[in-house]
Amino acid sequence: MNQPLADLSVATCSPAQLRALIESRRAVRRFTNEPVPEAVIRDCLELAVLAPNSCNLQPWSFQVIREPALLERLHPVCMGQHAARAPLIIAVLARPDTWRQACANVIDYWPEAEVPERIRHFYRKTAPFQYNQGWCGWRGLFKRQLVRLLGLRRALMRTPNSQAQMSLWAVKSTALAAENLMLAFQSHGYATCPMEGFDEVRLRRVLNLPRQAIPIMLLAVGKPGEKAVYNPRLRFPLEQHVEWL
Ligand SMILES: Cc1cc2nc3c(=O)[nH]c(=O)nc-3n(C[C@H](O)[C@H](O)[C@H](O)COP(=O)(O)O)c2cc1C
């Protein structure tokens, strides 16, 4: 997966193919029992983590749940919804807590023999300053005052400077990975349903989630069953959401 430089001139997929893939994805609520092969899951996860992400710190993790007994326990956690009766559920977790290890990983896994000095500097100095909010957020508090002052004179990045902003920071990148994941399964002929309809307290207990992990969605995956899609596609007119400046 790690390549020094991609050839950006190669268009690997036509606009029509991409449109067909995106248009074919729907939230599917009924699945067959057919298992999803491990090779497919692996391929889709590899594509998920190719999503763009903040500072390449990859603040996400995934739990792949195939064990029937565990899936059975998840069903009531998802309040008995149909979509949770899938042969595979992937818990997509945002990880505001992994940035420190990720800074070290960037240097350890750098895909060239020499790690450029600007990269070392960024991940040893700049990124820790940006992401370390300190015990109980005290550094964040200090940084908020600092950016208020410095920001009077020049443009600068003002977040993340609190634990709440760290959560938002991690969720943004993780949501992009989740979309990649759904499209990757779609390309393999498997349907998905993203679910936020779950009891987070019970989910944390059942999956033994790390304390700071944020379960942004449970992704149900499988072959679509009978009456798999509940409603026709509905989107509001583009003009309601787009401003051309
Ligand atoms: C963050 C998120 C959470 C969702 N949670 C649920 C859910 O708990 N149960 C469900 O059946 N669908 C859920 N959905 C699916 C949406 O209802 C669905 O994407 C939307 O109605 C649009 O339909 P479409 O995806 O088929 O275009 C969720 C989607 C997202 C993005």
Image (cartoon, rainbow, N blue to C red):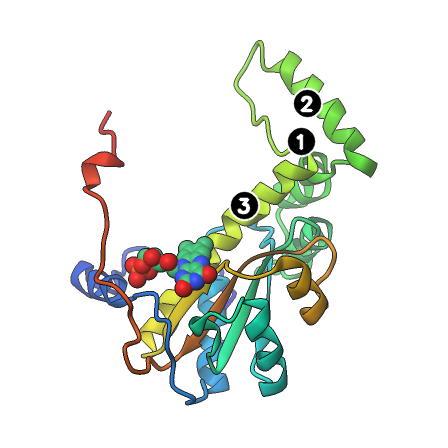
Q: Mark 2 Cα within 10 Å, few/some/many (few <14, many 20+)? A: some
Q: Is residue 131 left or right of residue 8?
A: right
Which residue in the rendered view is the most extreme toward the right?
A: 135
Residue 64's spot in the image, x, y percent? 57, 75
Residue pictured at 48% horizontal, 53% vertical: 175
Residue pictured at 45% horizontal, 85% vertical: 36
Mark 3 or 2: in front is: 2
Residue picked out by circle 1: 161
Q: Is residue 76 left or right of residue 189?
A: right
Question: Which labelled disc corresponds to residue 208?
Answer: none
> Which quadrant of the frame does ligand 1 lie within?
bottom left
The relative height of residue 206 versus residue 146 in the rendered view (above or below) is below
Q: Nearer the viewer, residue 192 or 231?
A: 231
Q: CA distance from mark 3 to mark 2?
A: 20 Å
Could you tell me the amino acid type at mark 2? Arg
Label pair 2/1, CB-CB below 8 angstroms: yes
Which residue in the rendered view is the most extreme toward the bottom?
A: 34
Mark 3 or 1: in front is: 1
Residue 143's spot in the image, x, y percent? 71, 25
Residue picked out by circle 2: 144
Q: Please, what secondary structure does the residue beneath circle 2 have?
A: helix
Q: CA distance from mark 3 to mark 1?
A: 15 Å
Residue picked out by circle 3: 54
Could you tell me the amino acid type at mark 1? Asn
Dot 2 or dot 1, earlier in sequence: 2
Could you tell me the amino acid type at mark 3? Ser
Question: Is residue 34 visible to us here?
Answer: yes
Residue 126's spot in the image, x, y percent? 67, 36
